[in-house]
Image (cartoon, rainbow, N blue to C red):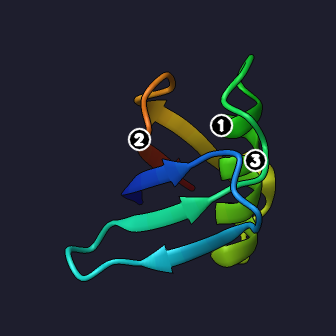
Amino acid sequence: MRIEVKVHAKSKRESVVPQPDGSYKVDVKAPPVEGKANEAVCEVIAEFFKKPKRSVRVVMGSTNSRKVVEID
């Protein structure tokens, strides 16, 4: 399954919020430096969908706030 996410890095909390258009808003505490925010996004999404972290990866938009994430 692939989902579109809008990431807010350096947030005060970590959360995943479904949006009306079918995408998700993801808040992570990690800064957008050296892939740390992408790793945090994968962890938070894996927890939200109750999947192992290795099943989640960013497939598009690794340097953008809008990303496409694949979940196995």
> Do the residues under discs 2 and 1 have CB atoms within 8 angstroms?
yes
Image quadrant of residue 3?
Answer: bottom left
Q: Amino acid at mark 3?
A: Ala
- Residue wearing tag 2: 67
Please tell me the numbered disc located at residue 40.
3
Left or right, 50 with reference to 23: right
How far is disc 2 from disc 3 in space, using C-alphas?
13 Å
> Do the residues under discs 3 and 1 have CB atoms within 8 angstroms?
yes
Q: Residue at x 78, y 42 (%)?
A: 30
- Residue wearing tag 1: 38
- Could you say where residue 31 lies in the image, as x and y percent from the top left? 74, 35
How far is disc 2 from disc 1 in space, using C-alphas?
9 Å
Left or right, 6 with reference to 37: left
Left or right, 66 with reference to 55: left
Up the image or down, 30 lies above or below 45; here it is above
Q: Earlier in the sequence, mark 2 or mark 3?
A: 3
Element at label 1: helix
- Could you say where residue 12 lies in the image, as x and y percent from the top left? 76, 63
Q: Amino acid at mark 1?
A: Asn
How far is disc 3 from disc 1 in space, using C-alphas?
5 Å
